[in-house]
Image (tube, helix red, strand yellow):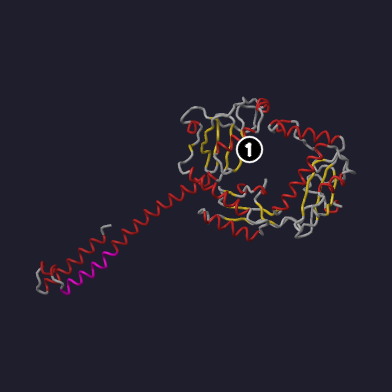
Amino acid sequence: MTVIPELERELIAAARRESQRQGESPEHAIAEPTASHRLVARARQFVRPHKRLGIFVVALVVTGCAAVAATSLTASSERLALGRVDCYYGTYLSKPWSKPTDVLNIDATLVNGESPQTWCRQDFSGYSSASLRQLHLTPVKDPKLVACRKNATTIAVLFASGRSDQCKHLGLAPLPRSYAAASSTARSLGTALRALYFSRNCWAPRPFAAAVRKVLAEHNLGSWRIFMPAPLHRSQSYNPLPGTYAQCAVFVYPNPYLGNPYQSIDGPNRSFSFELGMSHSDYELWNRVLNKLIAETWRTCYSASAARGLVDLAFAGTGRAVRLAVTRPPDPSLNFLVRGKFSQRLPRQARQRGAREERHYKLGCVIQPMIWLAANDRFADVWLTVRHGRWIKAGSYAPPNSYFS
């Protein structure tokens, strides 16, 4: 910092010595613009810009550090707002499902654009009092919840214990002040992606990726990576004709057709991914027919021979040719989710449905309908399972194509 002023002083002293040699007084040498003074002026012009440059560089470094700190803070809150939420049915953390305890950990899920407390309260409401008691948990009506920062990408939500330092007491940290703004950005991003998704009946993959890139840039997320879906695995046993199935860009499962983009958003890794699926109109048809088949096979016992009439009636008026495959279940140890510890965590309605399905299965009725719709609007494939149906390889994703007729 002292080199430049020292150089300036040496140049001025040299100029004064030159002036004295030419018969000028030191005072005149400074007052009058002689040749030697012009040397000094030029020397100062050479020196002072470097002083200004040094000051500018220092200011730039300081400003840059502040900008990096602000960016890091924003990125940190962003990763948290687009990260995961662990919901604990209690006032402290515990290993989930390790043993009966008074703490219940819901499977971690991506934030759905809501406050973490709201998200967890909805999860808690899906458990009946009886289910909670079976897990040795004390049911609590409308508990007050507190959210803490569990790690860089995870929020923990627990019952409020009344301690003002509950997060710190558990070895956690409170949510950062910038989390609210980051959460608002997450909701805005989700809303924009949902509107984009429903703006067309079917998005081709590449145009969809370009449109998503624009939305991300509008939310200052332009550096995110976008992962295109891989082509369908032709090695799968169900092998429809190329170009006839799953040609539209959809959000990552589950329930992509409901327009929920949050499973596609990977905040911790700053990326967005999507898959291939049906168009919106195909999904509406698929959902309507599938619900009809599920309801019918749940209410009434249909034999394998009567399945064709059931399926044809369900697709009546759609203009689609129906191909049907009826097999035994691909899982030899078929579990209807009515017994065991896992079933205790399910809502009562799900357990009742499983019990009815199990009775129908033992009676030899067709169950578990699955549907694939062709993107060319010409045909639909339906798969039903029955106790003594056609053999199928264990763990199969679908019956072989030759099974459909």
Q: Where is residue 263 in the image (x, y as percent from the top left)?
A: 62, 47
**Residue at (64% x, 31% y) in the render:** 98
Give the magenta-colored segment's residue range. Answer: 34-49
Task: Judge by depth and name the residue closer to the eye, 248 or 221.
Answer: 248
Does residue 235 lie above or below 370 as drawn? below
Considering only vertical position in the picture, is 396 above or below 146? below
Total marks shown come to 1
Residue 251 drawn at (x, y percent): 65, 51
Mark 1: amino acid: Asp
User: Residue 301's x, y, as percent?
Assistant: 85, 37
Side of 3 relative to 67 (left or right)? left
Position of 104 relative to 294 (above/below)? above
Q: Residue at x 19, y 72 (%)?
A: 38
In what element is the residue under mark 1? strand
- Residue under pointer 1: 107
- Image quadrant in which the N terminus is located: bottom left
